[in-house]
Image (tube, rainbow, N blue to C red):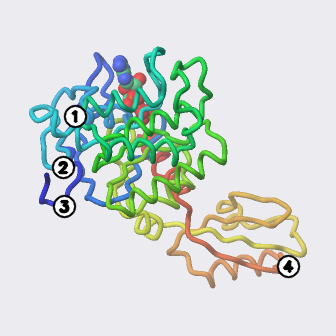
């Protein structure tokens, strides 16, 4: 058990596969009780980092602590503190879903009526109850069903830290909503949640803290709020009644989108609104409406990772 308030601590984690430097010295902490988003483009090293937490991948150097215990030297402790929901279900076709959950409970030495009730609750909450006796053969389960089984298996020992690797990839809207409601409830109950997702809108809505990794390196680490507000750009949507044939360079260089709703400009926060209004006025546009907003997490992400890609 950790008294430090830190759920997971990555200390200079490196992983090399022959010539590929999957992780190049990643260090950061995830606080207990956080809803933490681990984001990055494909191949950034997210799965390698997550799998290093659960001992599936052994880092080339560096160390990881889960709830104050070292993943290498205190594996049983960290394994118990962690519930990892992987992307793929590899299951024995001879067991039913309930049997799989009971087996998994047995692995952690959990049995008795409390555990049976928890399994019932998991089956119920993840809409698996009517399939509990069905064979967990991967050929017979739909994609969404497999995902639910994976989540139930990861939660069977009520881990303090829950790690979800792309939980909503390829699942329908209903399941997505069920998953998020359940995850939010677990978070409220005090579980630490670590999440990787391609859906940045989801990450923005759910995560209180975000790490962005790229090419095996930490690119940004901050509260979601700070990441958005510190971003040096805002977006200005201008609805026009009459378009002018030509816009001045100051406007064309900032124009990022143009549709029936109007023109969208990406403007440095240091450029004053009156400066922008001056350019709009001088260009002869007849402005009907203007609205300004901060960047979304997706826009921040794209800007940050584009900088890195050029490096
Ligand atoms: P992400 O999850 O962010 O998409 P990964 O952690 O899967 O990224 O991969 C990071 C890098 O490590 C990629 O270049 C990938 O090709 C490489 N990699 C991952 N696993 C292996 C492996 N088992 N053998 C060789 N290279 C690997």
Tell me how far mark 4 sits from mark 2, CA to CA. 59 Å
Q: Name the residue tied to disc 4.
A: 286
Q: Name the residue tied to disc 1.
A: 109
Q: Are marks 3 and 4 in contact (CB under 8 Å)?
A: no
Q: Are marks 1 and 2 in contact (CB under 8 Å)?
A: no
Residue 67 numbered mark, or none:
2
* Between discs 3 and 1, the one toward the N terminus: 3
Image spot of residue 139 (x, y percent): 59, 17
* Between discs 4 and 1, the one toward the N terminus: 1
31, 172: nearer the viewer:
172
**For mark 2, does the 10 Å Cα neighbourhood hold few (<14), some (14 to 19), or many (20 or more) residues?**
many
Tell me how far mark 3 sits from mark 1, CA to CA. 27 Å
Tell me how far mark 4 sits from mark 1, CA to CA. 72 Å
Q: Secondary structure at mark 4?
A: strand
Q: Residue at x 39, y 59 (%)?
A: 187
Q: Left of 66 or right of it: where is 300?
A: right
Q: Are marks 4 and 2 in contact (CB under 8 Å)?
A: no
């Amino acid at each position: 058990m950790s008294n430090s308030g830190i759920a997971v601590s990555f200390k200079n984690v490196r992983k090399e596969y022959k010539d590929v430097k999957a992780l190049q010295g990643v260090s950061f902490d995830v606080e207990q009780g956080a809803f933490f988003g681990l984001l990055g483009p494909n191949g950034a090293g997210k799965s390698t980092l997550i799998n290093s937490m659960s001992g599936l991948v052994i880092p080339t150097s560096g160390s990881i602590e889960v709830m104050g215990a070292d993943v290498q030297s205190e594996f049983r402790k960290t394994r118990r503190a962690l519930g990892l929901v992987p992307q793929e279900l590899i299951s024995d076709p001879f067991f039913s879903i309930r049997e799989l959950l009971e087996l998994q409970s047995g692995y952690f030495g959990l049995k008795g009526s409390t555990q049976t009730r928890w399994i019932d609750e998991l089956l119920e909450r993840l809409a698996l109850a009517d399939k509990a006796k069905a064979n967990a053969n991967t050929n017979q389960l739909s994609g969404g069903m497999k995902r639910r089984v994976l989540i139930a298996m990861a939660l069977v020992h009520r881990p303090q830290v829950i790690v979800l690797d792309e939980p909503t990839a390829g699942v329908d809207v209903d399941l997505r909503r069920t998953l998020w409601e359940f995850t939010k409830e677990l978070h409220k109950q005090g579980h630490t949640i670590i999440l990787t997702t391609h859906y940045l809108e989801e990450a923005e809505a759910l995560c209180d803290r975000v790490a962005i990794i790229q090419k095996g390196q930490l690119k940004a680490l901050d509260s979601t709020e700070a990441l958005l507000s510190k971003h040096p750009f805002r977006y200005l949507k201008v609805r026009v009644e009459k378009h002018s044939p030509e816009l001045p360079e100051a406007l064309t260089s900032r124009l990022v989108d143009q549709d029936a709703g109007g023109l969208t400009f990406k403007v440095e926060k240091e450029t004053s609104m009156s400066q922008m209004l001056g350019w709009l006025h001088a260009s002869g546009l007849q402005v009907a409406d203007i609205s300004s907003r901060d960047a979304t997490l997706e826009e921040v992400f794209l800007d940050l990772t584009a900088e890195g890609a050029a490096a």
